C-alpha cells in the first residue's frame, strides 16, 4: 500500500459493495439508506438508466439485421449465444464478449452473464417467487447436502420488505408450496390459459394454474412513482432496458434509491481482485481492484464488505483472497466452489387450440402462467426422484412465423392474419446440490487482467434425468386434458447454466466446518464480509431465485448495520 | 451497389413480364444500406426480388419489394448465414431457374404469376416429403421472406398492426373479421 494518509482517506468508505446487479443494488440501497457512505464497485461499463438503453425504442427495421444475429456478433459471443436468445442486436450488448472473458469447461457449463452496471438485473426474466418452508426444510428432511441454517420464517418479513419496494404483480393463492407475498394486480390470463386452469384443476386436485408472479409494476406505489417508475406498458422489450422503469432493475429501483441518499459512490470498470484481510484484527479491511481500462491496481477500504458479484465471481473472489488466516482463500470448510446448481429446463410440451377464434390479445405481456410444484408434494412422482418442478408457459394466438403453405395473395392474407391459439409450458426443475459439481480457479491460466480463469466441472445426475421424464409427460397430459391438438414435446439434454440461475459454491450453513457463510451470510472467520448473491444458496428450490437474493441481502444489511452499531464488526 | 443501380436491377428483374406493375418499385423502402450488399450476383439479386414478390405480392398493402425484402434478404444471407446456409440459398436459386427452364422454357422472372406460384408450390410440396420441409431451400427462403417482411417498416406498419408501445394488456380482446395480426 503506497497511499498517503489523504489518499487513504479518499479511498475509505463505511461500506463497499462488489457488484451492481440484483443483489448488489439491494446492498447499495440498504446500506446508503442506513446512512453508510458506500462504494459500489462495478467491473464493467456504466449503463445509465433510460439514456443508456440505446436500443429500447428501436423498431425491428431500425436494428442491425432486423435483430437477427450476425456472424460478427457470434464470433464474439458464441458461448453467450447458447441459449439461442441472448445474442441479438437489440440486447446483445448486455452479455459479455466471450473472447475477453474466457473460462474452462471441463464439463459443459453455459455461463451467460453481463458485465456492466445493473448486471443481469437488466436482462433477467423477472419471475419472482418465494421459496417455501418445504424448500427450506428439504435438505434436512432428506439428508441431502446440509440443512439451511435459516427457515422460511426468518426470511418471510424480508420477502415482504423487498416485494413492497420492487413491485411484484401476482395473485394470492394460499398455497403452502408457493407462499403469497405483497402483490400488485396480476396480469390476466388469456382465454386458453383460463381453459387450462379449469381443465387442470378439475382433473388434478393438487395442481394450480396461476398468473406468473413477476417484477413488473401494474399499480405503482407512491414510493415507486417518486423514483420515476411507471406501470408496465406491455411492450415486452424488457431485455433492452425499460424506459418506463416498469420492471425492477438496479437502474430503475435500487441504485436510483441509493443515489438519492447522496451516500453512494459508484465506480465502474473496477474489477475486484481480492479481499484484503488483516490477520491481526481478523477482519477484512478492504478490497484490491484492477481498473478494467488502465489495468492499474488500487485499494479501497471499509468496515463492511458486501460481495454481490454473482455466484461464480463472488466465489472466485473468495478463492483469490489469500492471507495467513486463509492461505487457500476465504474458506476453511472445503465447500467453497462446490455444490453448484441451476434450474434444469428445456423440457415441456405445446399444442394448438381450436377454441376462441373470436378473441385475441392486445399488448405484449412480459409474463405468462405458472403451475407450482406438485410432485413429491400433493402428488407422488412416477419416477423415483427427490424434489420437483414448476411450469412456466403462455397461451397466445400464433403469429406470422407459423408454417403456412402456399404463395401469393392467398398466402399473404393468411400470413397477415391471426393464427390459432397455441399454448406451451416448460418445466423448471430443482437441481440437487452435489459436492462434486464444482468450480475452481485454474492454477496458471489467467485472463487479460491477470485473474485466474474459472474452471467449471459440473453437470446433471440421475435425479435430474428421472425428474425430466415426469416433467415432459405431465406437460403432455395437461395439454391433453385441455384438448390441445398437434401436441409436441421436448426434452433436451439438460445443461448446467442455461437456466441462468447459477447457485451455490459458497453456501450458508450453521457450522464453519461445512459451510462458507453463516446464517446471516457472513463469511465464517471474516464477519465483516457478507455474501448475499446466488452463491449463498444451500439448495435451489424450483422457483426463480432472484427474489430470495433480494430478501437475503436486505436481511444481511440489517444485521450488518446493527452489529456495526454494537461495535461487533 | 448504389441505390439507383439497385432500383434499376429490381425494376429489370421482372423482365418482360406484365405480372407485376412497374410502379411497385417506385417507392422501395431502403432503411438498409444497399451499398453494403455484395453477396448476390445481379441475376441472383433479380431472382430474389421476383421470388419474394411472388411469395408476398403487392395487394392493398405493400408487397415484398415495396418493403425492401430483397435487400434485407441479401443483407442477412451475407452477414448472418453460415456458409452451408448461404450455399443452400444460392443452390436453390440456381435450381429454381433450371426448374423454370424445364417446365416452362423461360426464366422464372418471365413466367406469369400463376406459373410462378405453381412452380413454387410444387417445390414446397416436394420438399415436405423429407423432414417436413425443414432444411430445404424453399422453407428457408420463405421463412426469411416472412421474417424480413414482418420486420420491415412497410410490412410491419401497413400489412400488420405494429404497436411499439401498446400501453395496456387485454388478455381477451374481441377479434374483428379481417383484423391484421401483430408483427411482434
Image (cartoon, rainbow, N blue to C red):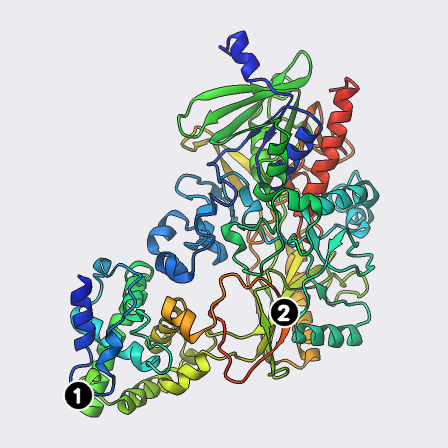
Which mark is first along the chain, 2 or 1? 1
Which residue shows up at 79% across the image and 76% down it? A202
Classify mark 2: residues with Cα within 10 Å, few (<14), some (14-19) or many (20+).
some
Q: Is residue A8 above or below residue A361?
A: above
**Residue B147: x %, y % from top left:** 40, 69
Seen from the viewer's position, the closer of residues B37 and A244 is A244
Q: Is residue A60 visible?
A: yes
Question: Count the marks: how many?
Answer: 2
Q: Chain of mark 2?
A: B
SS at badge 1: loop
Quadrant where the image shows the C terminus of chain A: top right
- Residue under circle 1? B106
CB under 8 Å between callouts 1 and 2? no
Q: Is A422 left or right of B24, judged from the image as shown?
A: right
* Occupied quadrant, residue A192: bottom right
Q: Position of residue A316 (x, y in %)?
A: 56, 33
Above/below status of A126 relative to A281: below
The residue under label 2 is B170
Cα–Cα gap, marks 1 and 2: 52 Å
- Chain identity of mark 1: B
Which label lies toward us, 1 or 2?
2
Q: Is residue A532 left or right of residue A207?
A: left
Q: In what element is the residue under mark 2?
A: strand
Point out residue A154 in the picture as x, y percentages from the top left corner.
81, 40
Amino acid at each position: 500500500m503506497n497511499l498517503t494518509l489523504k489518499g487513504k482517506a479518499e479511498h475509505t468508505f463505511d461500506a463497499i459493495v462488489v457488484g451492481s446487479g440484483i443483489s448488489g443494488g439491494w446492498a447499495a440501497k440498504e446500506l446508503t439508506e442506513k446512512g453508510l457512505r458506500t462504494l459500489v464497485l462495478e467491473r464493467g461499463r456504466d449503463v445509465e438508466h433510460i439514456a443508456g438503453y440505446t436500443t429500447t425504442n428501436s423498431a425491428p427495421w431500425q436494428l442491425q439485421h432486423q435483430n437477427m444475429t450476425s456472424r460478427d456478433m457470434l464470433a464474439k459471443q458464441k458461448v453467450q449465444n447458447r441459449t439461442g436468445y441472448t445474442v441479438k442486436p437489440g440486447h446483445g450488448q448486455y452479455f459479455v464478449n466471450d473472447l475477453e472473458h474466457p473460462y474452462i469447461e471441463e464439463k459443459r457449463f453455459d455461463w451467460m452473464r453481463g458485465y456492466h452496471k445493473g448486471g443481469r438485473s437488466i436482462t433477467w426474466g423477472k419471475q419472482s417467487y418465494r421459496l417455501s418452508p418445504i424448500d427450506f426444510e428439504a435438505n434436512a428432511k432428506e439428508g441431502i447436502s446440509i440443512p439451511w441454517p435459516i427457515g422460511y420464517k426468518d426470511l418471510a418479513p424480508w420477502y415482504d420488505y423487498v416485494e413492497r419496494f420492487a413491485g411484484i404483480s401476482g395473485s394470492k393463492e394460499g398455497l403452502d408450496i408457493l407462499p403469497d407475498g405483497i402483490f400488485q394486480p396480476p396480469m390476466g390470463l388469456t382465454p386458453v390459459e383460463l381453459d387450462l386452469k379449469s381443465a387442470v384443476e378439475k382433473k388434478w386436485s393438487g395442481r394450480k394454474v396461476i398468473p406468473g408472479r413477476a417484477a413488473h409494476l401494474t399499480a405503482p406505489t407512491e414510493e415507486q412513482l417518486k423514483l420515476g417508475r411507471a406501470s408496465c406498458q406491455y411492450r415486452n422489450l424488457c431485455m433492452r432496458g425499460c424506459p418506463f422503469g416498469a420492471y425492477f432493475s438496479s437502474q430503475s429501483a435500487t441504485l436510483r434509491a441509493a443515489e438519492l441518499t447522496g451516500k453512494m459512490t459508484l465506480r465502474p470498470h473496477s474489477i475486484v481482485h481480492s479481499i484484503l484481510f488483516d490477520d491481526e484484527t481478523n477482519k477484512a479491511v478492504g478490497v484490491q481492484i484492477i481498473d478494467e481500462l488502465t489495468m492499474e491496481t488500487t485499494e479501497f477500504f471499509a468496515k463492511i464488505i458486501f460481495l454481490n458479484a454473482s455466484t461464480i465471481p463472488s466465489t472466485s473472489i473468495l478463492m483469490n483472497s489469500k492471507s495467513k488466516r486463509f492461505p487457500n482463500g476465504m474458506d476453511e470448510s472445503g465447500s467453497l466452489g462446490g455444490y453448484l446448481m441451476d434450474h434444469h429446463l428445456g423440457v415441456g410440451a405445446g399444442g394448438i387450440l381450436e377454441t376462441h377464434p373470436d378473441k385475441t390479445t392486445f399488448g405484449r405481456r412480459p409474463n405468462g402462467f405458472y403451475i407450482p410444484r406438485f410432485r413429491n408434494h400433493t402428488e407422488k412422482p412416477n419416477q423415483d426422484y427427490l424434489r420437483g418442478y414448476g411450469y412456466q408457459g403462455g397461451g397466445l394466438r400464433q403469429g406470422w412465423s407459423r408454417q403456412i403453405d402456399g404463395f401469393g395473395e392467398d398466402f399473404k392474407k393468411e400470413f397477415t392474419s391471426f393464427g390459432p391459439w397455441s399454448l406451451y409450458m416448460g418445466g423448471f426443475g430443482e437441481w440437487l446440490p452435489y459436492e462434486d459439481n464444482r468450480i475452481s480457479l485454474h492454477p496458471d491460466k489467467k485472463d487479460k487482467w491477470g485473474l485466474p480463469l474459472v474452471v467449471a466441472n459440473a453437470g446433471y445426475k440421475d435425479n435430474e434425468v428421472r425428474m425430466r421424464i415426469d416433467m415432459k409427460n405431465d406437460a403432455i397430459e395437461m395439454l391433453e386434458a385441455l384438448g390441445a391438438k398437434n401436441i409436441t414435446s421436448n426434452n433436451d439434454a439438460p445443461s448446467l447454466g442455461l437456466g441462468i440461475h447459477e447457485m451455490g459454491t459458497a453456501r450458508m450453513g450453521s457450522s464453519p466446518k461445512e459451510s462458507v457463510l453463516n446464517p446471516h451470510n457472513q463469511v465464517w472467520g471474516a464477519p465483516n464480509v457478507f455474501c448475499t448473491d446466488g452463491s449463498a444458496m444451500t439448495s435451489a428450490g424450483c422457483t426463480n431465485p432472484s427474489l430470495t437474493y433480494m430478501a437475503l441481502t436486505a436481511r444481511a444489511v440489517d444485521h450488518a448495520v446493527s452489529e456495526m452499531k454494537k461495535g461487533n464488526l | 451497389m448504389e441505390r439507383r443501380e439497385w432500383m434499376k436491377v429490381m425494376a429489370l428483374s421482372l423482365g418482360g413480364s406484365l405480372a407485376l406493375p412497374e410502379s411497385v418499385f417506385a417507392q422501395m423502402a431502403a432503411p438498409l444500406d444497399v451499398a453494403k450488399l455484395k453477396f448476390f450476383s445481379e441475376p441472383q439479386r433479380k431472382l430474389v426480388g421476383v421470388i419474394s414478390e411472388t411469395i408476398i405480392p403487392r395487394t392493398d398493402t405493400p408487397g415484398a419489394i415495396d418493403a425492401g425484402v430483397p435487400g434485407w434478404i441479401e443483407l442477412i444471407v451475407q452477414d448472418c448465414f453460415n456458409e452451408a446456409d448461404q450455399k443452400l440459398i444460392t443452390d436453390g436459386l440456381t435450381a429454381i431457374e433450371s426448374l423454370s427452364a424445364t417446365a416452362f422454357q423461360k426464366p422464372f422472372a418471365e413466367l406469369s404469376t400463376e406459373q410462378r406460384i405453381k412452380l413454387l408450390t410444387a417445390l414446397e410440396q416436394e420438399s415436405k416429403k423429407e423432414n417436413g420441409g425443414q432444411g430445404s431451400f424453399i422453407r428457408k427462403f420463405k421463412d426469411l421472406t416472412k421474417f424480413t417482411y414482418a420486420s420491415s417498416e412497410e410490412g410491419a406498419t401497413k400489412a400488420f398492426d405494429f404497436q411499439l408501445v401498446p400501453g395496456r394488456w387485454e388478455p381477451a380482446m374481441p377479434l374483428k373479421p379481417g383484423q391484421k395480426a401483430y408483427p411482434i
